[in-house]
Amino acid sequence: MYHRLYSCPDGGMSIEVVSASGKHIASVTVEEKSTIGDVKKQLHSKKKAPYPGRQCLRTEVKGKALGDSETIKGLQLKNGSKLYFKDLGPQIGWKTVFLAEYAGPLAVYLWVYQRPWILYGDAIGAQIHPAVHWAAACWSLHYIKRLLETLFVHRFSHATMPLRNLFKNCSYYWLFTGYVAYHVNHPLYTPANGLSFFSGAALFFLCELGNLSIHLALRNLRPPGTTIRKIPKPTGNPFTNLFNFVSCPNYTYEIGSWIGFTVMTQCIPAGIFAFAGAYQMAVWALGKHKLYKKEFSDYPRNRKAIIPFVL
């Protein structure tokens, strides 16, 4: 059915919201200064769509999802323009997901660190090597840091993500933690020699500091309550100089931390965890690097995505 649209008496304009197939959902009244977030609230108040966090609006059927802060004027929408609606399904807050996926590894590792009878049977009385204590301390430090960053550092560009991600992300982190912790805390575990242990531990701590430095630098790029994007650049902190070489140094440092943990523990499951994480972070970094180059015409051309001079 065709719906004819008219200018509103108060000087506003009418925007038609349709499905991907072009089926009419609702018409909303907006002004040039109105935002996509305002449109979503109208749709929800009209009972034509679920809560705003579950809505996705585009100017084209297969176009980019519009941010809530984007304005009608900025998108150059006119009276009679169309927005395409998609129901994203049940959503959950990014912060909630991060807290769950990081709290799990902390709890699981420390439980296995106690050598519970259900895992190790009668061997629980065996002596624990100091390297095992250090491994538990490093693992705990990493995830306590991640929890604190989630609460006090990170500013998320999107408020929610699909609920299914909670189960997917938690399964990855929690199960891998059990796999690594079981072997490092096993009574028959053989620790690394002194050189491997200390070099691995040094790399781990340096990369943890580097990762934190990058997260703080990224936080300062985005004013509170906004989704503003800027080209990330080095600050006075020497750890941020890695921005001169890669677009996502937080991932570079994260990979370095787990390589250090693997060298420190000489544990094959830890190496598998480091490799799996490196692969996923490389995929994310390549995507972000491509987006940076597309979004900023003056983006530094000498930067790679995640590994200096290579990738």
Image: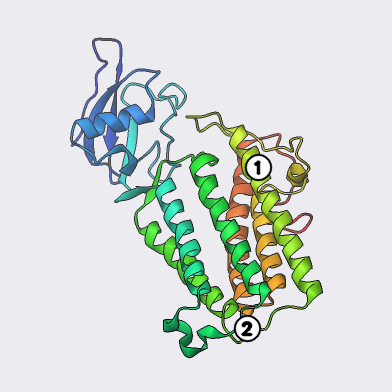
* Residue at which label 2 appears: 189
Camera-side residue of 178 and 304: 178
Question: Against 245, is 200 above or below?
Answer: below
Answer with left or right where residue 168 lies relative to residue 149.
Answer: left
Amino acid residing under circle 2: Tyr
- Seen at 48% across and 89% down, the residue is 122
- Seen at 42% across and 56% down, the residue is 100
Residue 121 % position (x, y):
46, 88
Quadrant location of the N terminus? top left
Residue 260 % position (x, y):
71, 65
Residue 146 % position (x, y):
55, 52
- Of the two numbered discs 2 and 1 on the same chain, state the one appearing first in sequence: 2
Instruction: Name the residue at the bottom extreme.
Output: 122
SS type, badge 1: helix
Q: Distance between the residues labelled 2 and 1?
A: 47 Å
Is residue 227 visible to the viewer in this orientation of the structure?
A: yes
- Seen at 24% across and 19% down, the residue is 6
Answer with left or right where residue 200 lies relative to residue 19.
Answer: right
SS type, badge 2: loop
Numbered disc in front, either 2 or 1 = 2
* Residue at which label 1 appears: 293
**Quarter where residue 4 is shown:** top left
Amino acid residing under circle 1: Lys
Camera-side residue of 15 and 140: 140
Quadrant location of the C terminus? bottom right
Residue 81 % position (x, y):
34, 28
- Seen at 23% across and 39% down, the residue is 49
Instruction: Name the residue at the right extreme.
Output: 195
